Amino acid sequence: MVVDQLRETELDRLFQAFADSTRRDIVRRVTVGEYTVSGLAGLYAMSFAAVQKHVAVLERASLVTKEKRGREQIVRGNHEGLQKARRLLDEYEAIWQQRVGRIADILAEG
Amino acid sequence: MPVISSTKNLEALSFTLIAEFDADIQRVWQIWEDPRQLERWWGPPTWPATFEEFDFRAEGKASYYMSGPEGEKARGWWRFTTIDGPKRLAFDDGFADDNGQPVDALGTTHATVNLEGVGDRTRMTIVSSFESEEQMEQMVQMGMEEGMREAVGQIDALLSEHAKA
């Protein structure tokens, strides 16, 4: 039951990142292709600085990577970060499938 | 396999599972209503559950512990929010400390269970929603143990089949 403290912090960041609809939209877009921060800023009715903040939250959560190219900052999806969250749900699914198997065994006794 | 489908919603942190059992709805309700039956399936074989308190009515509480292979105990609590037998129950599910006191910091899972008769079978739909990934991680710790146990069980079964052949 002991969860590594460092890992807990990572997980908190991950779910904080997912909690906002703009950030989820950014993740969806940059998973498919690369965007500049100014390109992303043009998509939402908010300031460049606000979009930059969202990108920073996503970066801390390891969901996106940011790289300088000349004057521009290129944002790309970080597939490992996304896979981590998905893996947790997969594991939870396995727990329930095994529970259902045990219920079926009990019911089969009559 | 009794599991018909399971759906994971990553962004909403929720999980839906639908299973059908070869038993009538009253019989399937018992596996929730009777703590002695519940104990036989809630925890994995490596972490069996024991319910010490089980007040099966709306606003009622249950407390349980799971015993690990090294003699360790993991405690948890439920609070029933809906009991509408034999069709529906809902409860919050959280962790507790060694004295059985809820550990709020780890958050709670909310589970809704619906039972529905389909011919002479019963369909069970479970929706679990989480507060945070941290808390989901805690749930999964034991699931991994269980996954390994299952794998070992399957290997044992294969070996015994070969022994018979």
Image (cartoon, rainbow, N blue to C red):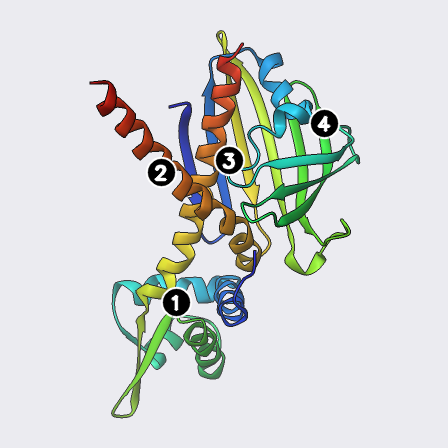
> Quarter of the image holding residue B33?
top right
Residue A57 is left or right of residue B82, and the answer is left
Circle 3 packing at 10 Å, graded few (<14), some (14-19), many (20+), is some
Q: Is mark 1 on a helix, strand or loop?
A: helix
Q: Name the residue under label 1.
A: A26
Question: In this rendering, does residue B139 appear at all?
Answer: yes
The amino acid beneath tag 4 is Ile
Out of B37 and B127, give the one closest to the viewer: B37
Q: Name the residue under label 3.
A: B45
Q: Name the residue under label 2.
A: B152
The residue at 44%/34% (across/down) is A97
Q: Which of marks 1 and 3 is in front?
A: 3
The amino acid beneath tag 3 is Pro
Residue B149: horizontal and vertical position, in percent?
Answer: 41, 40
Q: Nearer the viewer, mark 4 or mark 1?
A: 4
Position of residue B52 relative to residue B106, above or below, is above
Residue A26: horizontal and vertical position, in percent?
Answer: 39, 67
